[in-house]
Image (tube, rainbow, N blue to C red):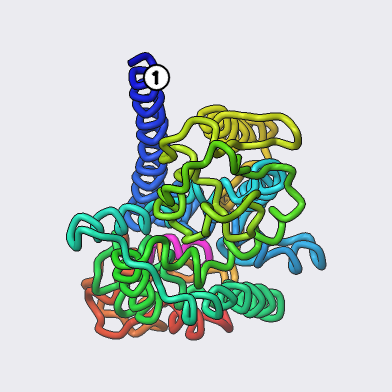
Amino acid sequence: MKEKVEKIRIMKQKRWVKNIRSFMLFLFLVVISYKAYLHQVLGGGSNGAASIHALCPYGALESFYTLFLSGTFIQKIFSGTLVLLIISIVLAIIFRRSFCGLLCPFGALQEFSGKLGQKLFGKKFVMTPKVDKPFRFLKYIVLLITVLGAWITGSLWMGPYDPWAAYGHIFGGIEEVFTELPIGLILLIITILGSILYDRFFCKYLCPMGAFLGIVSKISPNKITRDNEKCIDCGICTQKCPMNIHVASAKEMTSAECINCQMCILSCPKEGALKIKQGKKGVTPLFLIIAVIVIYFGGIFVANTMGVYKVLPAPIEKGQTLDAEDLKGYMTLEEVSQYMNIPIDVLYSKLGLPKDIPHHTKMKEIKNFVADFEVSTARELLKNE
């Protein structure tokens, strides 16, 4: 009787930790989604809101070559993005791919899509090994192509193909996403539908950040171990693993695919069969989750206090003149006139705009008045000013 009561107590405790993890993922997804919404409403200027690119650590990896070569970041990437990358690497070294399993908002979107799929179909689908194994290498190819492409071009060239960027732009209207990021939108739809059927579809097969952190995590002292004597061979750990790692047959989980989500341990009905080891010392799932949160947000707090966490451009000083290449979609016609020292009526004439368009109209909103107007076209027309 005592054993049964103790087992119930342990499973309740594990369920409580599961809920904490799910809540953190949900909260992080909501916060980033809200910031993406603000960016669409306010723009990305010094008085606006950070773009989804600036809040994704992968952007700093894409900007690394430019930063090393010239000391500058590529467009849309700032010092705060580099801070996020450094913290993510630190987490990968200490706790493996815990960013992916406990904090990543795109991972959260996929995970909740998977839960929806299991509710709809009443079961969890698993990709056949003949397809699954070779497809796992795709994310490493994506990592190589996207990083080298960004280093060569000095830009976020894959932005139009990025499903996460497409998600961030949804808050500006589906028509805008379809026009500006059609391939990214298609990949976003594939990711969500894929995750409804197969857990963490993008994480397993396409995510370059996951591939990078997986490589870094190979030096981590953190691992999940299985006690063969205590294990009852129920297979629940394998069933609950969103990355489809065969936990039930492994002595130690050191795979680069492991996102340290803790679901195998938190679902195991036999106490002590699965344990987290930090080197030789054991830690609990709750401790790991709290430690990851403290390191991540503590790192941001320290960087912000030191003045190095910046995710927005510096304010444009009075009298400062901008080049046409520096014009942004969030700038109003009035601001462009001011920043480029072009009389407002001359600006309208050069851009071929009707005089009835209000001066406070943002560049990216001009298409509401003039069909097919693009900010890139405006840059070209004003290049020689």
* Label 1 environment density (alpha carbons within 10 Å; few <14, some 14–19, many ≥20): few
**Residue 158 x %, y %:** 53, 76
Closest to the observer: 243 or 83? 243
**Residue 25 x %, y %:** 40, 43
Q: Residue at x 56, y 62 (%)?
A: 76
Quadrant of the rendered structure where residue 124 is? Answer: bottom left
**Vertical relation: 167 (above or below) 269:** below
Q: Residue at x 52, y 78 (%)?
A: 135
> Does the stretch in magenta take in 67?
no
Q: Provide the major secondary structure of the magenta segment.
A: helix
Badge 1 amino acid = Glu
Q: Please report the bounds of the magenta region as a residue range.
A: 332-341
Q: Residue at x 59, y 76 (%)?
A: 137
Q: Is residue 235 left or right of residue 283?
A: left
Q: Residue at x 43, y 56 (%)?
A: 242
Does dot 1 land on a helix, a strand or a loop? helix
Q: Quadrant of the C terminus?
A: bottom right
Which residue ends up furthest to the top in the rendered image?
Answer: 2
Quadrant of the rendered structure where residue 225 is? Answer: top right
Check disc 1 and report the residue beneath it.
Answer: 3
**Vertical relation: 325 (above or below) 13:** below
Q: Is residue 47 left or right of residue 64?
A: left
Q: Is residue 9 left or right of residue 326?
A: left
**Residue 326 x %, y %:** 56, 68
